[in-house]
Amino acid sequence: MNRPIRNLAIGCMVLFLALLINVTYLQYWQSDSLTSLSKHPDNRRVLDAAYSRPRGAILVKGKEIADSVKSKDDYKYQRVYPQGRQYAQITGFFSRDWGLGGIEATENSILSGDDSKLFVNRVVDLLGNQDPRGGSVSLTIDPKAQKAAYDGMKALGPDVRGAVVALEPSTGKVLAMTSSPTYDPNRLASHDFVAVNQAHKDLLANDLSPLNNRAIEEVLPPGSTFKLVTAAAALESGKYEPDTLVPGGSKLDLPQTSKDLINENGRSCGGDKITFTRALQVSCNVAFGSVGMDIGADAIRAQAEKFGFGSRYFHDLDDSLTRQALSRFPDNPDAPQTALSAIGQFDVAATPLQMAMITAGIANSGTVMQPYLVDEIRSNDLEVIGKTDPRPLTSNAVSAATARKLTDMMVAVVDSGTATTAQIPGIKVAGKTGTAQSAPDRPPYAWFVSFAPADNPTVAVAVLVQDAGVDRDAISGSGLAAPIAKAVMEAVLNP
Amino acid sequence: MSATRTSARAGQPRPGPLMEFVHRRRRGAELFLLVLSLFVGLGAYAAVGLGVDGEVPADIMAYGTWLAVLVVAAHITIRLRAAYADPIILPIVSALNGLGLAMIYRIHLADPDRTPTARTQLVWMSLGVLLFVAVLVLLRDHRRLQAFTYTAGLTSIVLLLLPLVPGFGREIHGARIWVHLGSLSFQPGEIAKVLLVIAFAGYLVLHRDALALAGRRVLFVDLPRGRDLGPILAMWLVSLAVLVFQNDLGSSLLFFGIFLVMLYAATERPGWLVVGGGMFLAGAYLSYLFVGHVTERVDVWLHPFSEAKGYQVVQGMYGMAWGGLTGRGLGQGSPQLTPFGYSDFIASSIGEELGLTGLMAVVVLYGILVERGLRTSLICRDNFGKLVAAGLAVVFALQVFVVIGGVTKLIPLTGLTTPFLSYGGSSLVANWAIVALLLRISDQARRPPPELSAGSEDMDATQVVRLR
């Protein structure tokens, strides 16, 4: 009987060897991937460990908008957002069970201290027997502009959907970015996990989706603010100048259909022929519809793409939930569709960020800068270990001459056109209103884009108010959106 | 046992052809290893307290004394009743049991409401040691067990059926393998395991010739005769019944595996392994198709991260990955996050807190334990003892492979306890009884061959054997 028993011994040895090899595979080779949060975001051990570590701060002009403070419970540190609702769409949240959002997610490796750039600091911490502390992230945000944008949206009411984006035209720095309705990230970062679950459930169930960052995540018809793109294309074509006479009147007969293109509220633009400047000043649909059909959809689309339509250029907030939506211009519109597209209706759709970039591009003599939010990253001893350099996205979206002409036309809009509500005493403001009708049964969207000062722009703003809960007739770019833009511009101009 | 070691050797003039090698008793070595094993158990217990609360547990003295008394009692029993028994088995068991106790204590500290205490397990261990002592004292010769072949077989089948009796059996966590007596509950399958090995051994010793000799050869493998397939078919059906009616994949696999291995050992014919392996694969595939419980386990094994039921396996893997090479340290990981980290998943808890190093040490300890068991079987002089020892050793091997393999995702997870480590009274008590049996057989096997009666020169003459 000894031979089979010896064979059994070998068999058992094989079994135990298999166990040893498998355990080695699991605990050694697979260890890194299993404890990587990007691959296994539900690994609570790693999350708990991350929770117990002091995380770097997110800073705006040296002030923390997200910070880790000592807590008395098991997790040692609590993430706090001192101005939670105001910065929620930017900071995101740091929750144990529901992942991370915003800058907390995109700069996680820096904030948590895991980034290889912080390697030296980590070794020093280890030798000094200190808890490894993450690096901090400084944002490009101007706190005054952010507050103005946030307060402006808030004043419209807690349930108003909308967004504000402000850019520095010469660099692409995001000076303000807010989306309404917002939420309190402190409720998601709390260590009371039952309450966190409830808060998270409520946020997901909310029809107004407060977790969405409307500044970058949703595209909507830009309405008359898109006339800037049509105007830019027209001026670039060489066929139009600001004083070129274009068709006016109260309606434009659309070819191939029995429908007419009419102006907002059916008004007349004044006279059968008006100047191009005048057409922008009064936001004349008839004029821009015919200009659009004249220069063609391809020219407008090419111009829109130079401003950034159809590309994804903003990555600073790309987390697992959020992505910059692509702004679009229809592919093959026929003549009447081209006319509608030229005034920002039909299938044209853009994010508030995109509209701000068009404005900033015009303000920056035709060069569109790539927008960015993260300015500097610093190690925990405040040494700068990374700084974002401004980069042009499109060097000559329009020529400097065209930009100057457009600027003059936009100044006319604010001075004596549809956007007088955006005037700032003593400062030349360039702007354009928009009121987009997407569907007959939906209330229109109010848009406003502007920059100031017109001759040396330091801020470009786009404001979207999706539904203000006011009468349909009262919804307009100049009434709802322009005052917010004005407040943001003032905040930047008068520090 | 009045002879001392030297006189025992002196009284042995020359090793006969039967045993070229004379075993020493090595009780001193056993005692030394036992002290080491106590260091493991108590050290782990103290480390848990230090890791969780920052101080050595207040009851360390009482706890340590209790543990030491149990271990020393077992050692003294061996000295008195099985002086030649293998000196390594008891220290291994003591180390594993001590480590298991510390781990159970550790998880209880982290999650006091839902987990058992180390104290309960220590009581079970005491019962186990009591049974260990009783077996060694009462059972002077393992061959007597052969008389109980059919009694043991019948009892084990009754025990297996018990949980199915309405009002008596209880289904816990999906498996109907529990019996309740008042407030006490136990798994009769654990005891059936021991009895089955005895029954198989008794049966096979008698029928091995019939099973071994007849048959035909197909492709280098001797296949058994059709009519000899009866027992293996019966055992296959019993295993399937355990699986289908009790939802106990682990025990089913274990019972069939032991039977197959013992059949192979008894008949020396690999053909049985081929037939049995084929039947196992067929049964496994059928149950994968038709038994929901099994389908679920296999799906979880294949895609642990996408199956909702994969939570436990995934948590276990996270824990072990978190432990890495050297572990988080006792009391400093989060083994309480893994469901049943104190019983079925105690291997992953050890992997988390003691690391790959610790878990490997545990696996190697089991490996040595199995090796000592098989060695006992090899040197045992009677076939019944050989079969029982091999069967019991393979019980440990299969059980450890099935449960640790399941926890580490080598094979689909099946519910089995990790011998001596897992929380669980029935299992612990049964395993201590197994160790007592192994030591009893080992004592017989290593004992120097009986002295021939004085003056007998003629080897052909009837030998007078002094049994005890």
Image (spheres, coloured by chain):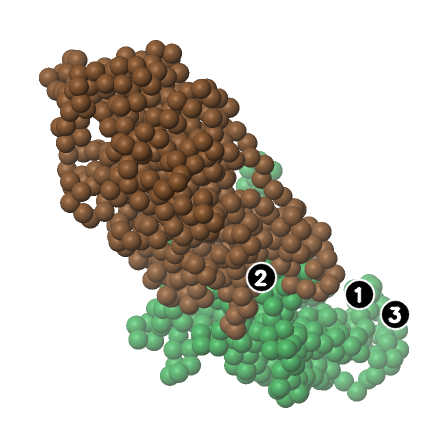
Chain colours: A brown, B green
Residue at left offset 37%, top offset 26%: A408
Q: Chain of mark 2?
A: A
Tell me if B65 is positioned left or right of A55 in this view.
Answer: right
Residue B187, picture quadrant: bottom left
Give the foreground label among 2 and 1.
2
Real-space Cα distance between discs 3 and 2? 74 Å
Q: Chain of mark 1?
A: B
Residue type at numbered disc 1:
Met
Tell me where residue B367 appears, x and y as whole percent.
Answer: 67, 60
Tell me if B68 is positioned left or right of A389 in this view.
Answer: right
Residue at left offset 44%, top offset 64%: A190
Query: Residue tagged by mark 2?
Result: A54
Asked whether the residues under the numbered discs 2 and 1 touch, taking CB atoms below 8 Å apart as contact, a structural biologist would say: no
Numbered badge on residue B14: 3
Q: What is the secondary structure assignment of the residue under circle 2?
A: loop
Real-space Cα distance between discs 2 and 1? 69 Å
Query: Residue tagged by mark 1?
Result: B19
Tell me where residue A490 appears, x and y as whole percent.
Answer: 40, 45
Q: Is residue B407 above or below residue B275?
A: below
Front one among A38 and B34: A38
